[in-house]
Amino acid sequence: MTFGRTDNSIVSRWWWTVDRWLLSAIILLMAAGVLFAMAASPPKALGLGLPAFHFVMRQLYFIPLALALLIGFSLLTPVTTRRVAIVLFGFFYLCTLSTLVFAPEIKGSQRWLFLGGMAIQPSEFLKPMFIVTSAWMFAQTKRKEGFPGTAIAILLCCIVMGTLLLQPDFGQTILTFVVWGAIFFLAGLPMFMICVLAVCGVAAVIGAYLLLPHVASRIDRFLDPASGDSYQVNTAMDAFTAGGFFGRGPGEGVVKRILPDAHTDFIFAVIGEEFGLIACLIIVMVFAFVVMRGFLKVMREEDPFLFLASAGLTILFGLQAIINICVNIQLMPAKGMTLPFVSYGGSSLLSMAMTMGMLLCFTRRNHYGSMGRPSP
Amino acid sequence: MRHITTIEFDGVGKRAVDNARGRVRVAMAVFALAFAAISLRLIDLGLLSGEATDKRVIAAALDVAPRADIVDRNGVLLATDLTAISVYAQIPRVLNAHDSALKLAGVLPGVSSEVLERKFASGSKFIWVKRKVTPAEYDAVNRLGLPGVGFQREVERVYPHGNLAAHMIGYTNVDGRGLAGVERFFDEQLRKEGPRGEPLHLALDVRVQHALRNEIASAVEEFTAIGGAGLVLDIHTGEIIAMVSLPDFNPNEPGTIANNPELINRMSHAVFEWGSTFKTFTMAMALDEGKAGFRDSFDATNPIRISRFTINDDHPKHRWLTVPEIFMYSSNIGTVKMALQVGTENQKAFLGKLGFFERPHVELKERGAPLVPAEWKEINTMTIAFGHGLSITGLQLAAGYAAVAGDGMLHPVTVLKKPVGYKPEGERIVSQETAYKIQGLLRLVVEKGTGRQADAPSYLVGGKTGTAEKAGGGGYRKKSLVSSFVSVFPVINPRYVTVVMIDEPHGTKKTYGFATAGWTAAPTTKRVIERIAPMLGVPPSDVPTHPVTHDMMQFIQPEVRS
């Protein structure tokens, strides 16, 4: 693609202002996701009586949509993106709320809405929109004297946390809360409040341990693998050690055949077995690159909303990747969390495309530090 | 308006953002640490790889010790480690015992679903479903994709040549420990080197080994013997080029081998009275001590009677015999008289120097201790002179021949390949002149005497027959013979000693009922030499005889020359 610098069309302006490093890294992860789905998903598809490449085809079907969302969001002006995000926050919150009423129970929780034959998990989409909305609230507090932004953000947080816990989706709740806490922290949360929040977090974990039996059992099994069925996690470890540094070779893996969530939450283990730990290290580096690049972009922001929103989205992306990888390599207790862009799954892919589309939008250059000003 | 907004923003917002930048650095540091921890963990997992993650599996794997290969002198593989795959189940991880047992039994022949289900319910955490499955079975089990069912690579020792050199190579138990042969003697070294280490290079040549084993097996069958043994020894280096003991075994099936006395190594472990083959040493001793020369004669007219024994000749001539005649006709009487000339003490010293009173020095654990008379009186001197009353191994017999018919030095024998130009240490037994004379005498036996059937044309074989009765039941058993032939070839500048021994042969129509060495071991030796000489690079020669043999014809009475 070449665009003259004097070309003032929307696309040309986008090309010169968007962070192309970030964009490339994200597209690389999407491509890797398709490649790894080819390796990881056939046994699962065959097990369900579907064609071997059923999941690969579905992933490929979602890719254009994801690209459209990614680029579409990044083409918008930050103001438009913020408005869209707030509207979508309301929409997806209502969807999430409706899962409690309409959604069938799958594996012990209600997370999925079925719309026209398609299953979507509204909470996946809710996360980035909630982060952007909260970031706006915190920013508005700085901007307008007397605006009760912080109070609104705390209220929103309580509402969203409560809803997620009712599903129940403990992993998403923790993730969302931590990201929200992080932007609160960046927004200038006093040290005293940080401590209060940390205590709240710990209390929430202990509360969940005491009140939610499946959380308790997962943590027990992590701390003492012998105490119960740690099948997925143990098998994932077998996959890594079987693969070694160079892997068994694409398609040669055996662990994926017996790992129930090989194509989604445990895809990293399949990569470890078939492509080797060096491939895993490369993936980790790409994620680290995206996160660090995001943070470097954040550092250059002058506008409080853009600053907080980009930081929040970067943290959301990075934290989700870290949690997924840590569960795979047994550094954390098992938790249902997808590996951004790499795991199979339409909701996850599209929500991540929106997340990163918004991040690309908020980190574009030449808006003169103020989101109110039109680009020249 | 817009201008005012900017000022306001620059005032309040900018300070807030500056403060936040410091906090972003904190977040960046936290993320950097997390990614670093993940990378370290991945590297840690990589270093773990290759080791099974389950401790029970590790323990099972450690029991099998991988070993280095064993190869022959030309690098032909004699023993190697192959990886076999075994199927195990970690029962706590098996989701549906009944279903899993049925599916496994369906693809693994010999595995019963009932037995398997009982094992699943046994309360143990780890069981073997089937050891050493075929690749097809492995694939089938893998395709089942059953949780809790895993594969363990196991090392299996494989001997591609089967029985061929079983006694030499030996075998290992299921845990990969050497139980016999060089596998046992070099156990530590083979395990230390490991499967990718330097292989153990034996002096053995599988081609020679095959020819020797084949001929001895034919002889054992032809003469309906209980066993046989053979050896090919390099005179210059002491290397054992081939060693056969029959009956033998298949080292790939170690379960069938243990504690079967029939399977003793008849060359290095079992000791025999060798009979007349031993006379060569009496002759070498007498010649070297100067107690007898080719011109000298001894009275073999009458049997020797001493206490309750009578020493007779198998082919009595009832006359005085010259020294070459005594050897040629294998006269017991003449040999005894020569030994008496040398004397008991000299004989003891001489045989002791040859190492006949201790186990053979060779890199095998299967080494037999000689049976040495507790009291060495004159009668012992007399019987030992013709090979009775002192039992040694075939390996020692061959080493002795290599000394007295080679360069006069006793060199250590070895199963290991030696580098080109290797000069072993040695102890002088007889002078080179004596050794030269012994060569002539050995050739004489093949040209004119009891060993005529060993004469492989153009390979100039020299040798000596020996037919001993086995001791047993308070005396010697006339029908239980040990027929042997020790050859040296070519007899001028000898390069190899061979031993062929047939354990309890029986005569056939073809041999006119004879089971003596001249009719059994000698023709076998001929066939062996004809087969192995080309492999060993011994060129055919048109020299008809040994110069000494030629010269000693004058001491042999004419009538027997025809």
Image (spheres, grey):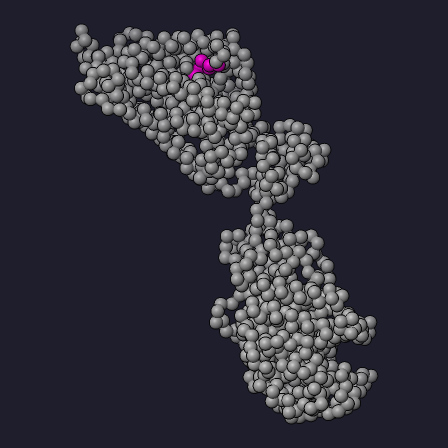
The correct choice, above or below, for B302 with respect to B105 in the image is below
Image label count? 0
- Which residue sits at x=64%, y=92%? B554
A117 to the left or right of B400? left
Q: Where B358 falls versus B333 (above or below)?
A: above
**Residue B373 in the image: x percent, y percent?**
72, 77
- Please tell me whether residue B437 belongs to the stretch shown in magenta: no
Q: From the viewer's perspective, is A245 left or right of B210?
A: left
The image shows residue B408 at horizontal and vertical percentages of 57, 81
Viewer-proximal residue among B423 and A4: A4
Which residue is rendered at x = 56% and y = 22% of the image? A48
Whether residue B453 is visible: yes
Residue A223 at x, y percent in the picture: 52, 30
Q: Which residues are magenta?
A: A119-124
Q: Decide if residue B336 is on the left or right side of residue B12.
A: right
Q: Quadrant of residue B179?
A: bottom right
Any part of residue B120 in sight: no
Q: Quadrant of the C terminus of chain B?
A: bottom right
Q: Which image quarter holds the N terminus of chain B?
A: top left
Q: In which image quadrant can residue A225 be found?
A: top right
Q: Is residue A19 above or below residue B468?
A: above
Residue found 33% across the figure and 29% down from its top: A289
Position in image of residue B264 (x %, y %): 70, 63
Q: Residue at x 55, y 84 (%)?
A: B432
**Residue A120 covered by magenta stretch:** yes
